[in-house]
Amino acid sequence: MIIELPDTSTKAIAAELAAARESHSLTTGRVLTLLVAIDDSGADTIDDTLATLRDASFEHPARVLVLISGAPEAATRLDAQVLVATDAGASEVVVMRLYGELTSHLGAVVTPLLLPDTPVVACWPQKAPGHPAGTQLGRIAQRRITNLRRGGSGMTLEDLTAGYEHGDSDMMWSRITPWRGIVASALDRHPGKRVESAEIAGAAGDPSVDLAAGWLASSLGVQVTRCSAHVTGDFPIARLVLHCEDGDVVVAVQDSHTVRISVPGHADSLVAMVERSDAESLAEDLRHLGPDATYERALRGLSGVDVEL
């Protein structure tokens, strides 16, 4: 169900949420408030974002406040939609279009609508701010999630590293979690052998590959070389070679569903791997609301990566 509230106020939105909860017998077991900031960049982009939020909500029922910033020079106005029941998944969603002076006061807009006594998470599924914790929404939230893969704003991993504060994370990091687990498993099959260096190849310009290289550099304490390679399907990493003292451990992605592992002294094995959607990546980020120390170390590890074009 979609309830239209043109030219409205946060007080009217709060009243409508309360009324919808009573009339539709909605549960009140929301586990967090999710603040989502996007630009007014077209109906398709907004619909894709709402679909991602709806799919992620089934694991994390939340009050989702979506802020769409329009023209700052327009007359000040707030138009809202309240989405409940099937249109909102397991959450209750408020889509707010802001115009004029309101585009500069996102924190003040959302404050009256925050759920009491629950964590607050801020998310930028499109353009990532260089310093998430320094934004109005970032100062409210305990956890801040960006999506550099879909940034399109010239942001780089180096910018996120420079602006990092405890509580930051990026969906490209959770996107490669299954692959990182496979790499760790491959090393477990080759215990006691020192890794001397590593080479990782993947899609040119994809920050997930760069971050994977930073993770290897920080975790293994070795020099990592990152180079470009053709990838099959949507998964950005093609091949990893870990040069060990008695031979190479190789993790090669066959397709978006299968990885081949080669370990000295063992027969090659095939392991299933599922390509993660944005909704699945977001759902994982919402499982851990504290600081992600491994992500921080991966960002810092970028300084130990050699990039070959």
Image (cartoon, rainbow, N blue to C red):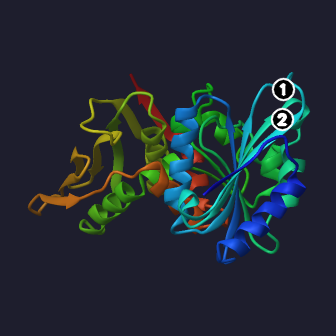
Distance from Cα at disc 2 to Cα at disc 1: 6 Å
Q: Are the two marked residues, 2 and 1, in contact with CB atoms closer than 8 angstroms?
A: yes
Q: Residues within 10 Å of mark 1 (few under 14, many from 20)?
A: some
Does residue 193 appear in the picture of this structure?
A: no
Q: Looking at this view, name the residue that lies furthest to the front.
A: 23
Residue 272 shown left or right of residue 204 in the figure: left
Question: Label 1's element?
Answer: loop
Residue 203 shown left or right of residue 283 in the figure: left
Q: What residue do we see at 35% from left, 49% from top?
A: 196
Q: What residue do we see at 89% from left, 27% from top?
A: 75
Mark number displayed over residue 97: none
Which residue occupies the foreground of this view, 281 or 96?
A: 96
According to the picture, the residue beneath numbered tag 2 turns out to be 103
Question: Where 309 sits versus 265, above or below?
Answer: above
Q: Quadrant of residue 226?
A: top left
Residue 267's x, y, as percent? Answer: 8, 61
According to the picture, the residue beneath numbered tag 1 turns out to be 72
Residue 309's x, y, as percent? Answer: 38, 22
Q: What residue do we see at 23% from left, 52% from top?
A: 257
